[in-house]
Amino acid sequence: MTDSKVFQIIAMDGGAAVGKSSTSKALAERLDLMHVDTGAHYRTLTFALLNAGAAPEAEHEIESFLKSLKLETMLQERSARLSVNGQIPEDHEIRSPQVNANVSKIAAIPAVRKSLFNYQRAQAKVAREAGFAGLIMEGRDIGSVIFPDADHRFFLDADEATRAARRAKEGLTDSIADRDKMDKARKTAPLICPEGATRVDTGHRTLEEVVNYICSLIQIQA
Ligand code: DC
């Protein structure tokens, strides 16, 4: 069992395709952390809402639909996944062009963000109880809203050409620039580099270099 005194929380924010997931997963392996991808949370809710026939503009309808959803966590190795009414949708379902096209609109709805706030904060307890040395959570508002009190807060960035090339390599159709624009412009919990967070450029570094660099910063900041 991990000593609760050394339990650490790492917030990893940044725009689409800047390398948050690969970096967070590699850090989770290296530092024995539980990994939570909050982009997958918004994608899962978007998938559920679209399946239920909700229009992204129908905020009141969406708000009442959200109340009918039971959100739980299932641990898959070191990755904590959100299940909705007992189901975890497949990766290809939550990363489809249809979800990509709607997720930023859905994520801008205050009721949607509110429905995930306590759930996401509670992931620290899940990680502690499962015996991990800490939690790494990736998203857009982790260091600003969900865990402004995190032990370490990073904001990843990369040039547009690198980001587009990454998505193309994954074989995914994604409107990176449009999503970033909407995520930055929304009123509730916009995508920002929070004050005090460390900005890391992933565009001119390999994954290993990024992970080594962040590990060295964590040691310095500890
Ligand atoms: O990380 P991702 O590209 O899978 O995230 C999908 C969308 O979810 C992103 O365009 C905005 C939204 N999101 C958010 O609003 N807040 C978060 N903490 C994580 C993602």
Image (cartoon, grey):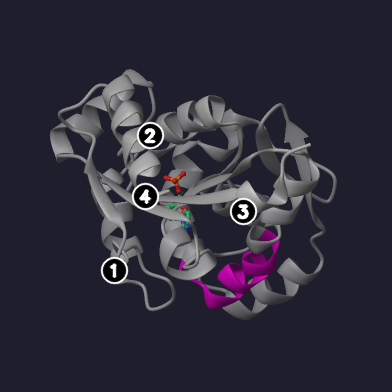
With respect to residue 76, does 121 lie above or below? below
Which callout, 3 or 4, points at the residue further toward the start of the chain?
A: 3
As shown in the figure, which amino acid type bears the numbered disc 2? Cys
Which callout, 4 or 1, points at the residue further toward the start of the chain?
A: 1
Question: Label 3, label 1: how many angstroms apart (C-alpha)?
Answer: 35 Å
Which callout, 2 or 3, points at the residue further toward the start of the chain?
A: 3
Secondary structure of the residue carrying tag 3 is helix
Whether 115 is among the magenta residues is yes
Secondary structure of the residue carrying tag 1 is loop
Question: Label 4, label 1: how many angstroms apart (C-alpha)?
Answer: 16 Å
For residue 174, what is the image quadrant? top left
Q: Position of residue 206 (x, y in %)?
A: 25, 21
Q: Position of residue 149 (x, y in %)?
A: 50, 67
Whether 14 is among the magenta residues is no
Q: Which residue is mark 4?
A: 221
Magenta stretch: dominant SS?
helix
Q: Which residue is mark 2?
A: 215
**Magenta extent:** 108-119
Left or right of 115 on screen, residue 13: left
Residue at 82% x, 58% y: name it: 70
Which callout, 2 or 1, points at the residue further toward the start of the chain?
A: 1
Can I make out residue 19 in this image? no
Q: Residues within 10 Å of mark 4 (few under 14, many from 20)?
A: few
Question: Label 3, label 4: how many angstroms apart (C-alpha)?
Answer: 43 Å
Q: Which residue is mark 1?
A: 195
Secondary structure of the residue carrying tag 4 is helix
Q: Position of residue 56 (x, y in %)?
A: 52, 65
